[in-house]
Amino acid sequence: MTLRRVALAALALILLAAGLLIVFQRPIGARVLARIADTQVGRDSVTTMPDGLNVALCGTGSPLPDPTRAGPCSAVIVGGKVFLVDSGEGAARNLSRMGIPAGRIEAIFLTHFHSDHIDGLPPVLLQRWVGGTHTQPTPLYGPEGVEAVAAGFNAAYALDSGYRTGHHGPEVAPPTGHGATPMVFSAQAAAGPDGVVVYNAGGLVVRAFTVDHGPVSPAVGYRFDYGGRSVVFSGDTAVSAHLNAMATGADLLIHEALQPALLSAIEHRLDQRELPNLAQVMRDIVDYHATPEQAADAAQAAGVDALVLNHLVPPQPLAYGYPAFLGDAPKHFDGPITVGEDGMLFSLPQGGDRIIRKRLF
């Protein structure tokens, strides 16, 4: 058979396959969607997690648009219960993609009240309420001011919650379970040398401590301790001696990071395009965030085992660019540094010092 005949035969097969895909598009599409539903819908990855502290990144982005990252959100899974630290836009979507049922959420801890840390709350509250048929609102922990956040969202979604109960019935959507209940703790107490215990149940102890995100105040981080393992969340902060002290000896530090060397390119382009307000915002945000190098310094000073960077500024849609984002951070910390990505899971089993990393999507 000549090369020409081989090419013609291959072309004929390609056209035939394309024709079959078009003719049978509807049943093929239905089968594909059924397969996706069979493998994804109702998936519960929590049941396969080891006993210990499990940390899932449900959002590693910032207010700057990044198609690969949701807003700030981390999930701590202990004993089958889920605790969120912040709930940025897209948090509920990513929890579902990771197979972490919102109905398992025990409580949400807010680091501060910037919009990007709370604008994903409504879908999370809704899915937690209906997904778990909860009869009590979601406990929402935070320093003074969390009352206003809870009241605002409860008021904004009061009509919606009534529709849900009216449509699905009180057995599915109990009218007493929607929204959030503020669990206020004192920022002054969190400023103490040992922070303040805000949650203590089932062997899990959560401490809040103040960080430096001025002029935003109060702003806090959290330390979770369970079964001899510990993880610390910085929240949004510049260099903070209090954070370093509270993270001392932790297994894992989840720390925000902003790389000024890369952000300057966005600032320059905004100036060129005569968008001075946005350019000024880029200049302003540098002074109340930490660089990757400073996050690495914090990890080194605290003696943690591993560092994960989140709340990435500017956006990092390609892993190829991570070395430029990290800068000299690897020279500042002896342990491993991970540029956080949505869907990552870090498991810290009891009875050892292992940190097991995997992906949930």
Image (cartoon, helix red, strand yellow):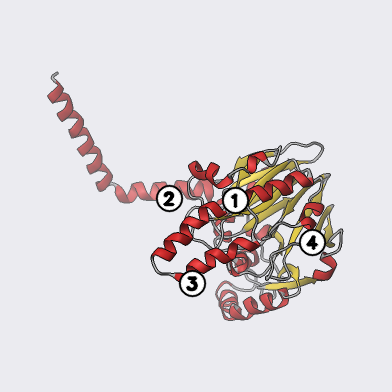
Q: Earlier in the sequence, mark 1 or mark 4?
A: 1
Tell whether 319 sits left or right of 147. Answer: left
Position of residue 246 measured from the top left corner of the image (x, y, whole percent): 81, 54
Report the amino acid beneath label 4. Phe
Q: Secondary structure at mark 3?
A: helix
Q: Is residue 231 above or below residue 287?
A: above
Q: CA distance from mark 3 to mark 4?
A: 33 Å
Question: Of 52 and 264, which appears nearest the observer?
Answer: 264
Q: Which residue is mark 4?
A: 209
Measure the alpha-carbon separation of dots 1 and 2.
17 Å
Task: Give the x, y percent position of residue 155.
Answer: 63, 81
Residue 72 in sight: yes
Residue, x 84% and y 63% (percent of image)? 196
Q: Please state which amino acid type lies under the numbered disc 1.
A: Gly
Which secondary structure, mark 2?
A: helix
The CA distance from mark 1 to mark 4 is 30 Å
Q: Report the disc number at residue 99.
A: 1
Mark found first going from the N terminus, 3 or 4 = 4
Mark with earlier residue (1, 2): 2
Q: What amino acid is labelled 3 in the image? A: Asn
Q: At numbered mark 4, what does the secondary structure look like: helix, strand or loop? A: strand
What's the CA distance linking mark 2 and mark 3? 45 Å
Q: Which residue is mark 2?
A: 33
Say which of marks 1 and 4 sits in front: 4
Discs 2/3, front:
3
- Circle 1 packing at 10 Å, graded few (<14), some (14-19), many (20+), is some
Q: Which mark identifies residue 190?
A: none
Confirm whether residue 315 shows in the render: no
Q: Secondary structure at mark 1?
A: loop
Report the Cα–Cα distance between label 4 and label 2.
Answer: 46 Å
